[in-house]
């Protein structure tokens, strides 16, 4: 099953390589943070570094398939919270995660990466992925994750673009922090059953043209039609 997941993650990249005139390559930089038994609900808690790269295949002005690999740092400490149970429990952990995902993007408005400078779109994304985990509390392992998020992207020119994205990773695993359900029975949260982590940051993308360039007028016409 795990081999099938890994193959699926990168099959879209292999297929897309034959149609590079619709491909963007990009670099990502930002932060990552954890939600789970220690940090139960606080967004952007202990935000640490994250970076990586992405490969985006633009099917049309609305739909995109994207493969990405991100590396992030995760930290948490009970002493950062005023909950009496956590103060007395006094557990902490640190670690890293290597995040490989295949996601589908939907643009809320028509968008072309080779359009005019200033052209932009808001989008939502979701898919499937694998997290390679290495922390202070458990042996290195990898687990299935469900990635989803929201973002915005804008053209800097006919070949360059910039974007910002806030993504979440739903894990089917409750020991990312090394602890399984060690939570105050008086305090429950929507993430109690499994741990999560989140990645937020900015990407800079470069448009790759394979062969002749697409005609911007053609895409403009398609945008008008839609």
Image: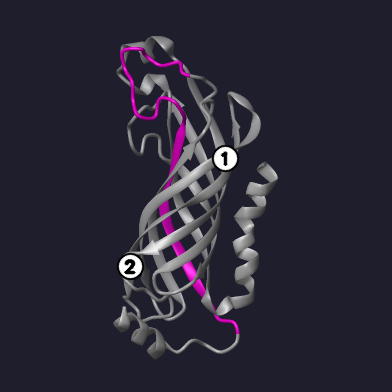
Residue at horizontal 59 percent and vertical 77 percent from the top: 19
Q: Nearer the viewer, residue 175 or 164?
A: 175
Image quadrant assignment for residue 44: top left
Rendered image coloring scheme: one colour
Q: What residue sits 53% from the left and 49% below the top?
A: 128
Q: Which mark is residue 144?
A: 1
Residue 101 is a magenta residue: no
In this view, which residue lies farthest toward the right? Answer: 3
Give the extent of the magenta segment: 181-210
In the image: residue 16, left or right of residue 162: right
Crowd around label 1: few <14 · some 14–19 · many ≥20 (10 Å): many
Q: Is residue 3 above or below residue 119?
A: above
Q: Is residue 20 above or below residue 221?
A: above
> SS class of the residue under badge 2?
strand
What is the x, y in percent for residue 77? Answer: 43, 23
Badge nearest the viewer, 1 or 2: 1
Q: Is residue 17 above or below residue 28?
A: below
Quadrant of the rendered image containing residue 197:
top left
Q: Which residue is mark 2?
A: 121
Percent from the top left, x then y, of residue 175? 54, 25
* Residue 182 position (above or below residue 201): above
Image quadrant in which the N terminus is located: top right
**How far, Cα to Cα, is label 1 from label 2?**
29 Å
Do residues under tags 1 and 2 come within 8 Å of each other at their CB atoms?
no
Question: In the rendered image, which quarter contains the C terminus?
Answer: bottom left
User: Going 43% across and 23% down the picture, which residue do you hit?
Assistant: 37
Q: Position of residue 213 (x, y in %)?
A: 52, 87
Q: Count numbered badges in the picture.
A: 2
Q: Secondary structure at mark 1?
A: strand
Q: Earlier in the sequence, mark 1 or mark 2?
A: 2
């Amino acid at each position: 099953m795990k081999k099938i997941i890994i193959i699926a993650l990168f099959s879209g990249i292999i297929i897309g390589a034959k149609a590079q005139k619709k491909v963007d390559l990009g670099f990502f930089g930002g932060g990552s943070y954890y939600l789970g038994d220690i940090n139960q609900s606080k967004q952007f808690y202990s935000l640490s570094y994250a970076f990586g790269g992405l490969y985006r295949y633009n099917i049309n002005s609305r739909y995109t398939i994207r493969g990405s690999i991100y590396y992030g740092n995760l930290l948490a400490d009970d002493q950062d919270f005023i909950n009496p149970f956590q103060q007395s429990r006094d557990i902490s952990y640190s670690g890293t995660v290597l995040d490989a995902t295949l996601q589908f993007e939907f643009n809320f408005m028509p968008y072309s990466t080779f359009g005019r400078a200033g052209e932009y779109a808001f989008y939502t994304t979701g898919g499937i992925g694998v997290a390679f985990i290495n922390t202070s509390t458990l042996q290195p392992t990898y687990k299935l994750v469900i990635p989803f998020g929201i973002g915005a992207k804008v053209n800097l020119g006919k070949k360059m673009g910039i974007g910002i994205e806030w993504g979440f990773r739903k894990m089917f695993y409750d020991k990312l922090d090394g602890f399984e359900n060690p939570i105050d029975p008086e305090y429950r949260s929507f993430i109690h059953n499994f741990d999560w982590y989140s990645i937020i940051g900015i990407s800079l993308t470069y448009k790759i043209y394979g062969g002749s360039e697409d005609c911007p007028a053609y895409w403009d016409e398609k945008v008008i039609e839609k």
